[in-house]
Image (tube, grey):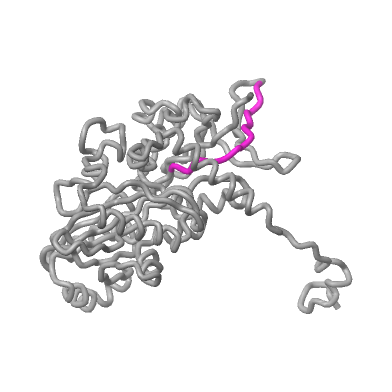
Amino acid sequence: MSQKNLIVAFGGVSPEHEVSVLTAIQAISALEDSAYNCIPLYVTKSGRWLTGEKLLDLSNFKELDKLEEASKSCAFVKDDTGKTLLREQEGGGLFSKPKSYPVHAVVCAFHGSEGENGSFQGVCEMMNIPYTGSGVLGSSVGMNKVKAKLVAAAQGVPVTRAVNFYESDWQQEQEEIIQVAEGYDYPLIVKPVSLGSSIGVAIANDREELINAVETAFRYDAHLLIEEAINPLMEINCSVIGTPEDCRPSVCEKPLGKTETLSFEDKYQSGEGGDKGMASADRVIPADISSELTKKIQNLATKTFSALNASGLARLDFLVNANTEEVYFNEINTIPGSFSFYLWEETDLPFDKLLEELVDIALKQHQAKNGRVRSYDTNLLSEKAMKGIKGLKGSK
């Protein structure tokens, strides 16, 4: 039986570009002995789409310029039958034709920005191809921390108090914004609204630190939020797999960081093996918390996953008051680093089987969508009908 092509899409115009590369290479490695043939679709930092065998080797990413020169431009195209292909834009030699790969499904391994916010998912929808993870709506809402918390709170999921504002608001109403935030008391947490991996996140212990943190965060995003801090803080994460109608939680984890909130370095540059992405971060799995608290967080995770219209796999992060065990939803990662495979291994679901389940979910979602009426036959543009539409050129 011939292998089916899985397009593994990664990279992108995002501060989390390198993290995405790690996640993609991990996934490709895990599927090495599967029934799938993994084809890389690498989106460069400038937005070019590339493919080629050299993109399968992590060591080649040390010299991006050389890697881009050795790779081939590509794009999704439709053949004469309407089937979607990933097609190279140039051949490998003077007389060779560009290769085309029929697309069975796309594994989305982006982190942040255009790859995780629904933009790339929209391309897949337009080309009518199955893809893993959340759809356009779930991806876009999940990427926006403010909107995600509004939806969660509307469903009765507890969230921390916060004030959000744009750069223009900060320029015109800085004092008012600071006063609202200081009403939560210091320390305060400053975050970009639409980034992950803790990029741009900072703790402010006084007004001077708050202003500096805001100014720094605006380098990454035009929309920020300032949140109250939970003290004493315990962070607990839980992954969820499935669809909004049918999903299940993983075991919980307790990440361990050097500071009160996890930094980019804590998540990706701690532990052994810098090429392991989130799998190398320091953590306790399963989290050393009570069974009651575990169940509570798992229930909140699946409830929030469904409320945000997430699909495939996500990781939901919660803030817990270590004294009172009050739980607050913090954020959802609709494409978590390393696909959170380390959480599912604890439930006897190895990485390769986890990815295969994600592809199965994508195929079933795609089949269900195509089972609906997607076009409507009408004679609206017929000559007779056109005459009845006022304002069109020639319709008199």
Residue placed furthest toward the right? 384
Q: Position of residue 76 (x, y in %)?
A: 61, 41
Which of the pair 77/392 is nearer the observer? 77
Which of the pair 359/181 is nearer the observer? 359
Residue 363 placement: quadrant: top right
Residue 182 placement: quadrant: bottom left
The reply to whether residue 31 is visible in this rendering is yes
What residue span does the magenta drawing correspond to?
96-109
Residue placed furthest toward the front? 291
Residue drawn at the location 61% of the way across and 45% of the way down? 129
Residue drawn at the location 22% of the way across and 49% of the way down? 263
Residue drawn at the location 57% of the way across and 36% of the way down? 74
Q: Position of residue 273 (x, y in %)?
A: 25, 30
Residue drawn at the location 63% of the way across and 25% of the way down? 2
The reply to whether residue 18 is visible in this rendering is no
Left or right placement of residue 3 versus residue 304 in this view: right
